Amino acid sequence: MKLDDLKHNFAQQIETSSSEAKLALQVDELKVKTKKYQRDIKVRDFMEISISLLLIPVWLYGLTISFNWVQSLGCVLATLTSLYIPYKLLKARRLSPCKDDSIRAYLHQEQQRLAQQKQLLESIVWWYIAPIFVSVMLITLGANMDDNGVIQLDTHMQLYYLIVLLGMVGIYFWNKRAAEKRFGPLLTRVEQQLNELCDE
């Protein structure tokens, strides 16, 4: 009886060490993939933040030469949007501090990072594109306002607003799909590995 118990315990130890080695290999593969997307995110954030900050003087200059309150409102909104975009991008990269160096803690942190980036991409129309569109729309509407305060919109401008609005709707659906395609599989993989760890 004791010999059977020893055989059983030995088999379990071999199985456990084999599954731990397999998990460590999977985590190493995941680290390689996550480093690549983190590098891509850093480059994207650097470019977006740089452009936003470089546009602030343009919007402020537009505010000084605006013809009416509608253009001024558009320039103020554009300036606020140019300040909000860096905040939003940097906030999405912020993670809760990791308390230990375990595989589980690493996987939880990656899960949080991937979920934040996925949500950021899915909602880009609301925090990025729509405010810029509204700002530019107010600036152009103000440029088409006569001395009596009446906006004179020709057919070309109406068509322009319609095309941009349809473009925003298209960008919304395209980004939802892109977020799922880019971050979905990696997020699913991290969650599966977390579930495997919890089952052990």
Image (cartoon, rainbow, N blue to C red):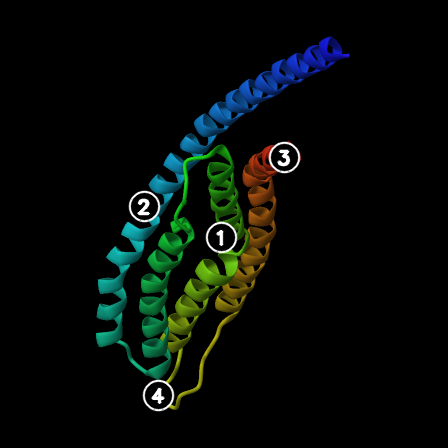
Amino acid of disc 3: Gln
Q: To which residue does mark 3 refer? A: 192
First in residue order: circle 2 vs circle 1:
2
Q: Is residue 43 visible?
A: yes
Q: Quadrant of residue 168?
A: bottom right
Q: To which residue does mark 4 refer? A: 147
Badge 3 marks a residue whose secondary structure is helix
In this rendering, is residue 23 above or below 112? above
**Viewer-side residue, 101 vs 111:** 101
First in residue order: circle 1 vs circle 4:
1
The residue positioned 59% from the left and 40% from the top of the image is 184
Badge 2 marks a residue whose secondary structure is helix
Q: CA distance from mark 2 to mark 1?
A: 16 Å
Residue 47 image label: 2
- Residue 190 in the image: x percent, y percent? 57, 36
- Residue 111 in the image: x percent, y percent? 52, 42
Q: Are marks 4 and 3 in contact (CB under 8 Å)?
A: no
First in residue order: circle 3 vs circle 2:
2
For label 4, the crowd category at 10 Å Cα-Cα, with few meaning under 14, some 14 to 19 and many 20 or more, is few
**Viewer-side residue, 176 vs 183:** 183
**Viewer-side residue, 110 vs 33:** 110
Nearer the observer: mark 3 or 2; the answer is 3
Q: Quadrant of residue 193?
A: top right
